[in-house]
Structures are given as C-alpha cells and as structure tokens.
Image (cartoon, rainbow, N blue to C red):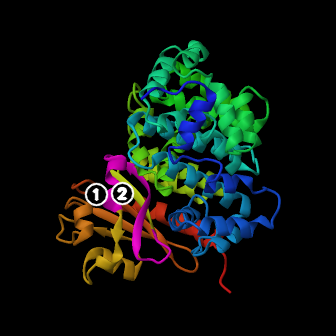
Amino acid sequence: MADPRGLDAWLKLIAKQELPSLDTVIKAICDLSDDDDSNADDLTQIILRDADLTSQVLKVANSVHYNRSYSPIKTVSRAIVQIGYVDLKNIALASSLIDAFLGGKPREMLIQRLARSFHAAVQARAMARELSIVDSEEVFIGALLRHVAELALLATGRTVAERFIRERDEHPDQEHSLALEHLGVGISTLNKALIKEWGLGALVQQAAEQPDSKDPKIQAISLGSRISLTVHKGMGHTDMQQLCVSVSQLLGKSVAEVQELIVLNAEEASSVAATYGAERLLPAMPNHETLTQGEAAPEKTDHDFQRYMNRISEAIMDGDSLSRLLQLSVQALNLGSGFKRVAVSLLSVQAKTLEPAIVYGEGGNGWRDSLKLDLNKLRKGESLHDFLQLQEAVWFQAAGGQGATGVLNDLADGGDVMLAPMRTRERLLGVIYADAMGGGLSKRQYEEFQLIANQVNLYLQFHSPASG
C-alpha cells in the first residue's frame, strides 16, 4: 500500500481512520457558539446521542477537578447548571478526542505523544488559573490540541508517520524539510488544515501559529508544552530550571514556588487522565521519581510535615481548588509523614463503587487498578464495610491483632492501614487511605494522618452548600 503524499491525501486518510471529521460529534461540538446560552440544549442533545460519551462526561463532571458543589451530578442538563456550559462543552470535546485517538489498538508512540499533550494541557490550565484567566478550560483544550496533526498522523498507524516524527525529534531544526520528504506536506500546513476542518477554535489556531504571542493564554499553552517536552530530564536539569524562571516571570511567583507547582501539576496530570478514562496514558505520564531524578533525596527532618501543613493552610487561605488541596495532602502524608502509599478515593454518583482519584507513593499508577472497589461485594463485618458505616478515622494495626480484614487487608498487603472519611455537609464524598505496604505505622503518623483529614474536612464543610 503506497504511502499518502501531500495535504489532500493525508486529510482523506485521516478522515477514514474513524478519527474526528466533519460529520462527527466533535465537529458538532465545535460548531456550537461559546457565548450563546441557548446552545445548552443543543450540547445536551449531542452528548446524549452517545451513551459512552454521556457516561464519560458525567464521570468527569463529578470529579474533584470540576465539581465544586460536591453534590452528585446525574444528568447532562444538571452538569451544565453546576459546571457551566463552556466548561462542559470543553469536557465533551476533550472526552471525544481522547476516545477517538485511543480507540482500537494505539501504537506506543501515539500513547507517548498523547500523554505529553495531556500533561501540557494540565500544566497550561494550572498557569491560566494562577493568572485568573476565566477560560482556563479553553487553555486546556488549546494545549491538548496544539499539535493535533502529529496525533492524527500517528493515529493512522502508518510507519512513514512514525519515521518522520522520530527523525524530526532528532533534528528539530529540519522539521519542514523532513516533513516534505516523508509526508509530501509541511507539518504546520497539515496542522492548520486540521484545526480549520475540525473547527477547533481560534485559540488552538493561535497557539499553533503564534506560539511566541504575548497573550497570557498563549504563553501558558507554550510554556505547558515546553514543560511536557522537558520534564523527563528532571527538575534539576538546566533546561527545566530555565523554564521555571520563565514561568515565574509569567506568574509573578518565586522559582521555588513554580517548581512546586510544576511537580504538583505533573502528579495531577495522571489523576486527570484517569478521570477522562485514559488509563493507557498513565505509564507514559511523569511521576515523582522522574521529576526528582538526578537529585539527592532531601534528608528527613522533624519539620517536614509541618512545612506541608503550612502549604495546605496557605492553599486554603488562597481559595485553591479541592483537587489542589488533595494533591498537597497526599504529598504531606507521603513525603512529610512517611506513609509508603496514599490515595484519595471517591464514591461514585450512585455510591456503589469507590474509585481512586489521586494516588501517590511507591507503586504509583500501577497500584491504581487495585483501588477500584465494587462496594456491592463488601461483606458485613469486614473492615471497609464497617468503616463506611461508622465514617470515623481508624487505624488498623496488624501487629496488635487489630489488622484490616477483607479487601482492605489485601490492599494493605497484610500490614497497617489508616482510613478517614471525606464529608461534605450532606454526604460522604470519599475516603483518604494510607498504608505501609505490609509494614507497621506509628502513633505519630496516625496523629498527622488525622490532622490532614481534619483540614480536608474543614475545607469541605466550609465550601459545600448548605442544605435546603
């Protein structure tokens, strides 16, 4: 089979790959105006046409990253009311595109590049929020799709596309000539054509065509992309240090503050990807080990945990989101208090499953699947069942004969485990989990675990809406 050559040939091939094209749900979503509220009904109908998309949109809408009311969202129309039309439109668009690119059996290079785009999108959105940019979700989409032609080429499965990208990565200054040699068309030309054909919007187009613009949105997108390209070198690398300086200048924060934000956002990228049902991207996402490679592990001190508590207090005072508070909390427990593994799991809308939202520590994302629990299978008398009934912080001590039983014992590898409820004024939102990977925990760790849980619950009590 001859390889396609030229713009028209590649556009036709991409359209045949069951990728986004003019007559798909993605085109329909992009055609909706961002400023006409009457389009809410149209968006609802587009989403409801596809049962899988409906389910995915509601899952994302109920996550800690989007649902600031913490009340269950059970319908698309309710999601528009609670989250907002524009944000839900962007959630639907991102969900559809991720599903399209990950459909079938994506090759490893596509997974790697989509993971990089997703990480860039999370970093860019976080910067937009720091800058108080109202349309932070638009920035997320802009960073996710800035290099959409590269993703679309890889999704065709053609060897020539992978060959071009591999050689381009080795010789970035020869991108145009390599594209003409392998594809018969410049990659920027194909990128512009796809953005226009799929109607991906003015910001995506501007981000692709004017990456050096002084527009704060474009700066956030460009810096997010550069971070995702460079972060594998580690935070201590000269290139990353220079990027941190650029971000600090944009945000008006110290380099140290920016470094912490980048690490938090990199960890959050995995959490957001899982929320979008893109678990296949998780092995390609940066983790704490990647970020700190080449750096000497800091010596533990008695003040580590208190430093994290101070950061959590600052986040609460600054009005940061719940997702940011939870990221800081699991870091405090893992890095400050010494728990081997920490997780925050949320109850589903129907409260029949417990799904991990954030995982941290040894084992990382490989541990995530074990945390997906069907609560219908719990037996009365086993530890997790009784905890969900009492909803009080608890320490299961294996050495004292009071270890966890049932599924909780399996999760903790037979060792100590601590649980605490996360409650709004109205309901149980989820569970904070920490263990020692089969080992024991200390009284000091239990005290610190309870302090973190209390901070989270005070935040939820303060920010959740009052009943009636």
- Seen in the picture, residue 312 relative to 203 is either above or below; the reply is below
The residue sitting at the front extreme is 1
Point out which mark residue 445 bears: 2
Q: In which quarter of the image is the C terminus?
A: bottom right
Name the mark on residue 441: 1
Q: Is residue 289 magenta?
A: no
Q: Label 2: state its secondary structure.
A: helix
**Could you say where residue 26 lies in the image, as x and y percent from the top left?**
63, 53
Depicted 431 relative to depicted 213: above or below: below
Point out residue 396 in the picture as x, y percentages from the top left corner.
27, 68
Q: Does any portion of residue 256 appear in the rendered image?
A: no
Q: Foreground: 179 or 467?
A: 179
Q: In which quarter of the image is residue 36?
A: bottom right
* Residue at (52, 56) in percent of width and height: 326
Is the C-beta separation of discs 2 and 1 under 8 Å?
A: yes
For the N terminus, the quadrant is top left
Asked whether 280 or 314 is in front, the reply is 280
Write down the region rendered in magenta.
347-371
Q: Name which residue lies at 54% across and 42% down.
A: 118
Identified by mark 1, the residue type is Leu
